[in-house]
Structures are given as C-alpha cells and as structure tokens.
Image: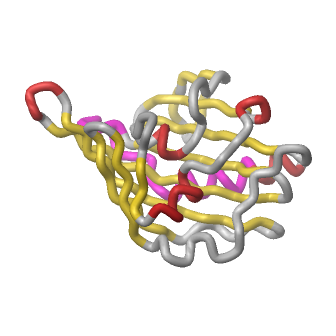
Amino acid sequence: MILAGLTWVFDADVGGPASPLAFWGFGPGWVTEPPQCAVLAGPATDESTTKGWSGSGPGGIVHTVVTGSPTAPVTLEPGAAADCGHWTATSGNTSGTVDLVDAPAIDGATTVGMHTVAKTVVEGGRETTSSAYTFNAYVDDYLTSVTVVTDPGSPNPPLGGKFAADLLVKTVSALRG
C-alpha cells in the first residue's frame, strides 16, 4: 500500500495488547507514575472489539486501532489528563517519559496527544531509544488511537506527530462514514 508517498507493509492483525504502552515497547507489568496517567496509554479494552492495522516502512511504524462498542464502551473521564502533563512509565528494562502534546480538534470527540521517549537496555548494557507520538480520539463508545513509532537508527526522516495527528482525523472521519 502507498501511504504518504511511501510503500508500506501492513498487518491487519494487531495481535496482543493493542495499547499505546505496548506499541511504545513496554511489556506486561508496566507501571506509570503518577498511576492515574495509565488510563491515557493503557485503557481497559475488550480484545473482541479491538480492530486495527499496523504498518512499517521508511520513517517508522504506524499502529491504528479502534476499540469499544455500545456494550463495551471505552471512555475517558473528564479531567483524567489534568495531572498528566508529564509522567513516566517503566516495565522490565524499558523506561520512558510521556508528555501531553496538542491533539487535533475533532467535532464530538475528546482528543488526547502524547509524545514518549522510551529507552530500553539491551544485551551488553547498550541502550536503544525510540520516540513515539500517539493521538487518541474518544467518540461515543469508541476509542480510536494512532501511534507512530520512529525506527531507532533509521537513516530516513521520522514521520512524526503531524503525520499521526492527521491520520487520526482521517481515521475518525472514515469511521463516521
């Protein structure tokens, strides 16, 4: 498929946990500080309602997910992000910082934008660093989420936050028909 003028390989099965924290490289047992920020990047979802795709190509890895239903709604409580302007997440050998960023305005939706920088200690004590932008839109009983993760060490320019924000707007529009 051609997206943003580049050829991408897509996988319709997002497999495993379909949350921003998982896409950012955090494994099971992750912890956030402060704890109330977990809902922004690891919302409780029903895997049976989660659909999406992921693709990789020059500039990064893209994950787009929609989850929720009238019988299994995914919502964000008003003020949930109030104390989460800057927070941390850890899991195993991975730690990261998360900052709220401006999210695109979408009529009838609550939107949240996040930028994370995650560091993972690998064999021999070396560190890999990745950067990701995630934009969420809570629309009725559904959560639509777009995450773009840069490929550490890639010679290609990263897709970045604008790409992820624009894709969120297009995804919500497509879902609304």
**Which residue shows up at 80% across the image and 58% down it?**
139
Would residue 53 appear left or right of 75 to someone viewing this image? left
**Which residue shows up at 49% across the image and 69% down it?**
101
Query: Residue 64 in the image: x percent, y percent?
Result: 63, 40
**Which residue shows up at 43% across the image and 59% down it?**
115
Q: Which residues are magenta?
A: 151-171
Q: Is residue 169 magenta?
A: yes
Query: Residue 147 in the image: x percent, y percent?
Result: 53, 46
Q: Is residue 70 magenta?
A: no
Would residue 73 appear left or right of 160 to someone viewing this image? right
Question: Looking at the picture, does residue 54 appear above or below residue 65?
Answer: above
The quadrant in which residue 49 appears is top right
Towards the viewer: 113 or 3: 113
Question: Looking at the picture, does residue 161 appear above or below residue 28?
Answer: below
Residue 155 visible within the image: no
Question: Looking at the picture, does residue 69 appear above or below residue 80?
Answer: above
Would residue 142 appear left or right of 159 to someone viewing this image? right
